Amino acid sequence: MRRRRAAAELHQAAEHHHRNVQGGAARAAVFGVSDGLVTNISLILGVVGAQPGAAYVRLAGLAGLLAGAFSMAAGEYVSMSAQKELLNRELDVERHALKAEPEEELAELAQVYQRRGLNPEAATYLAEMMMKTPEMALEAHAREEIGVDPSSIPSPYPAALSSFASFAIGAAIPLVPWFFAGGVPAAVASMGAAAVVIGLVLSRATGRSPWRSAVRQLVVSTLAAGITYLVGRLVGLDITH
């Protein structure tokens, strides 16, 4: 009894859970925050290069935040909708094949299992079990032939909303200092806040060192913003007209 209890406790302690890192919403959130930050800090530093007042920088930053967030959400919605329609079309083709040619589909599934390492008898038996239920047959063929789980086709709405929110959050980080300061202090604060916040967020998501993520983000943001800043300095701005 004690051994069984100890074994159960050991098994429970060894259990671990994985997060879903393949969903459309998760992917949109990760890329959205980084895109929003790099895009808006590049825009802000580009405007700063023209040496306008802090009010102009805030206006440009807000415009960049809204324009980028709506653009990202629309693009993600269209992309995920097209992907969903394509997958549904392939599933319809598979449903038709299962009804029209069940024997051929059974043999095809058995061959798949044989290539996975099962002997012919076991592969045929497993395929027959799968083919007994239409839903299970469709799921088996979809997984093996298309690489998709029919019950977990991503929806474009969560991905679009997540993309909008994450881009807006990322774009707001370098903009916040400009509501409290201006000039070089605000520019430095924008770069620093961007690096620290994104470093901490990515470190929690990936398990990597927050300082390593922060330094990487700072380098990427500095390169992108440095180019736009130089362009802003070259072009300049005459706010009297």
Image: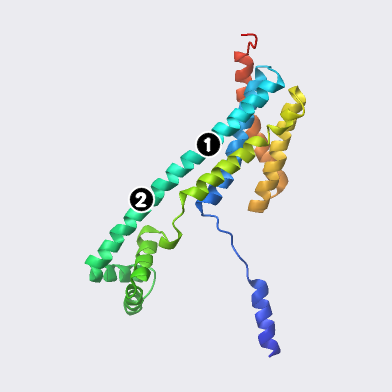
Residue sitting nearer the eye, 96 or 102: 96
Asked whether the viewer can see residue 225, the reply is no
Q: Residue furthest left?
A: 100
Q: Which residue is mark 1?
A: 70
- Circle nearer the viewer, 1 or 2: 1
Which residue corresponds to the image point at 66% horizontal and 86% vertical from the top-left?
A: 4
Q: Is residue 19 above or below residue 128?
A: above
Quadrant where the C terminus is found in the figure: top right
Residue 222 placed where, x, y %?
Answer: 66, 31
User: Picture quarter containing residue 161?
Assistant: top right
Residue 44 placed where, x, y %?
Answer: 64, 26
First in sequence: mark 1 or mark 2?
A: 1
Q: Amino acid at mark 2?
A: Leu
Q: Give the CA distance from mark 1 to mark 2.
A: 24 Å
Question: Is 124 displayed left or right of 48 in the figure?
Answer: left
Question: Is 32 displayed left or right of 123 in the figure?
Answer: right
Which residue corresponds to the image point at 32% horizontal and 69% vertical from the top-left?
A: 109
Which residue corresponds to the image point at 64% horizontal and 40% vertical from the top-left?
A: 169
Q: Amino acid at mark 1?
A: Phe
* SS label for mark 1: helix
